[in-house]
Amino acid sequence: MLPISTLIVPRRSLASCVRAIVVRSTVGCELPDEQRYNRYPATEFPALFLQLLGESVMVEPWAPEMVCPEGGALLSGGQSRPTVSGNPGPTHFMTVLFFPDALHRLTGIDMSTIVDQFLPLDGLLSTDWQQLAGRMVAASGDEERIAVLEEFLEPRWQAVRGGGAFDGAVGDWVRRLEAQAAAAGIGRSVRMAERRIREWAGQPLRRLRRSYRAEQSFFAAREAALKGKLSLGDVAHLGGYSDQSHMNRESREMTGLSPGEILRRLQEDETYWIYRIWN
């Protein structure tokens, strides 16, 4: 039996709130210990993490005290560097990734204060959010969990979303965020606009642009590789990099590997499962 790794998009009305829902299960799978890891790229998206079966331990950066037990829930901020978690045995977890400014609107959290952190919900989120996590963990299956999540978010997101919503495309989100910060800062300094973007998104605009470019270049490389027409030089050129070395450097900052190395690993190393399903 193969592990289950699934990326689920939210209902259309929540497309500008939730980036994706990721489900991972290795229940019933015969995996060697070295394959019970999860390797993630740096990301701008904060996440609600639910440990449904088994437990997860943070491996890179090393934090032995950061253990999410079965039935546990954490909120993670955007991550400025690649991370690795491990599962000592069979696992089943769900990760709900939010657009950071959407989560800011929903909760009031300054996104810059939770970057590179994994935090318990108690004391961070209001009681209704904590109850949401409890209901999702207790649900009978993943479809029910997603239904519970969407019914919770729908009215709250409609109440705070404001104008300028978009259809979930990350590039559109980055451009919209920049425009909104500039509009809100008319008559004020550029520094104030940058501070506002950090509060809303957790990371500076320059970092968000680089992350988006690296993600799009990886998608292009993966698609070309599947068609047997991969030219990393062409991918770098189309991505706006000065050359392939420039693309490789930025990719290593985001993932720890060059695009070519990632493409090789995702075919033979189960720990890179997120790169297979991400789109």
Image (cartoon, rainbow, N blue to C red):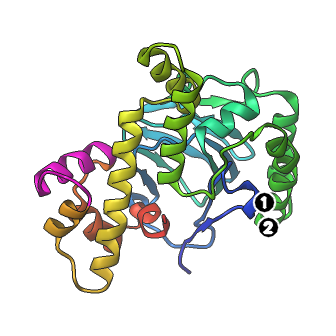
Above or below: residue 1 compared with residue 24: below
Above or below: residue 262 compared with residue 105: below
Q: Is residue 148 magenta?
A: no
Q: Is residue 164 left or right of residue 219?
A: right
The residue that disc 1 covers is: 146
Q: Is residue 59 left or right of residue 228?
A: right
- Which corner quadrant of the image does residue 147 belong to? bottom right
The quadrant in which the N terminus is found is bottom right
- Which corner quadrant of the image does residue 105 belong to? top right
Q: Position of residue 218 (x, y in %)?
A: 33, 62
Q: Secondary structure at mark 2?
A: helix
Kindly identify the amino acid type of the residue bearing the numbered disc 2: Glu
> How far apart are the two marked residues, 2 and 1, measured between alpha carbons?
5 Å
- Which corner quadrant of the image does residue 210 belong to? top left
Helix, strand or loop for the magenta stretch, by majority: helix
- Residue at 25%, 70% in the rendered image: 264
Q: Which mark is residue 143?
A: 2
Kindly identify the amino acid type of the residue bearing the numbered disc 1: Ile
Q: Position of residue 199 (x, y in %)?
A: 56, 23
Q: Position of residue 6 (x, y in %)?
A: 59, 69
Residue stretch in magenta = 239-254
Q: Is residue 221 left or right of residue 155?
A: left
- Residue at 58%, 29% in the rendered image: 200
